[in-house]
Amino acid sequence: MTASFPSREELRQRGVRKEAIAELYEVWLAAHAEGMKLAERLSDIFGDPPRPKITLHVARGYDDEYNLSAERVEELGALDPEQHWNEVSHESTCQFQEYFTFSDAEGWRFYLPAFLRHYLAEFPLSGRDAVYLACIRREHFHLFTPEQVAFVDEFLDLCRLWEER
């Protein structure tokens, strides 16, 4: 996975202050390069977990409606066609930041790498912290392999390291 870091001009157009760009751009580039190195390992570490019953729209349904019938779960799940976490769009991870609050362990295994991939693609400027907070909370990690847990630890270490700079 290779996501290019925005140019200084692109950051200015997004509203980032010129002073911040002048002071921190090189630091951001270095952080982004480290994030991309970590992201390159996602597929090897997380593999191909099965599609969960609680998909993005189903989790939103639990948030909005609390109780869902089996028919409603099926209806909402049909709105999420992804069969592999690599198919989950950046737009989806941005729109469904509440996912980890309403998911189950199988959902965490399926969606966590997608959220990590998109967070790291924008690292260190990602403004969406759902995956960071989920990694700190560590719910449902009983289904994760030791290698996956170690990857999450590396991700958190990377975030903490660059937060301090």
Image (cartoon, rainbow, N blue to C red):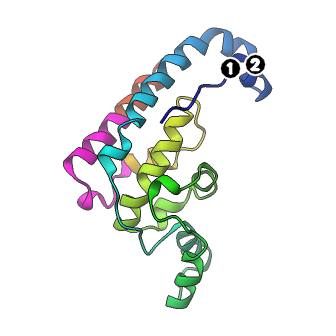
Name the residue tied to disc 2.
9
Q: Point out residue 93 in the picture as x, y percentages from the top left corner.
A: 57, 53
Which residue is located at x 58 percent, y 75 percent? 61
For label 2, the SS is helix
Instruction: Identify the amino acid type marked 1.
Output: Ser
Verify whether residue 53 appears in magenta: no
Verify whether residue 143 appears in magenta: yes
Residue 122 figure quarter = top right
For label 1, the SS is loop
Instruction: Identify the amino acid type marked 2.
Output: Glu
Main SS of the magenta segment? helix
Q: Please say if the residues under marks 1 and 2 sit with CB atoms less than 8 Å apart.
A: yes
Whether residue 10 sits left or right of residue 164 in the image: it is right
Q: Point out residue 154 in the picture as x, y percentages from the top left corner.
A: 32, 34
Which residue is located at x 42 percent, y 24 percent? 34
Q: Point out residue 75 in the picture as x, y percentages from the top left corner.
A: 59, 83
The numbered mark at residue 59 is: none
Whether residue 157 sits left or right of residue 123 in the image: it is left
Above-or-below relation of 116 to 17: below
Whether residue 71 sits left or right of residue 154 in the image: it is right
Name the residue tied to disc 1.
7
- Which stretch appears magenta? 136-155
How far separated are the C-alphas under marks 1 and 2? 5 Å
**For the residue carrying disc 2, how many other residues have a C-alpha within 10 Å: few (<14), some (14-19), or many (20+)?**
few
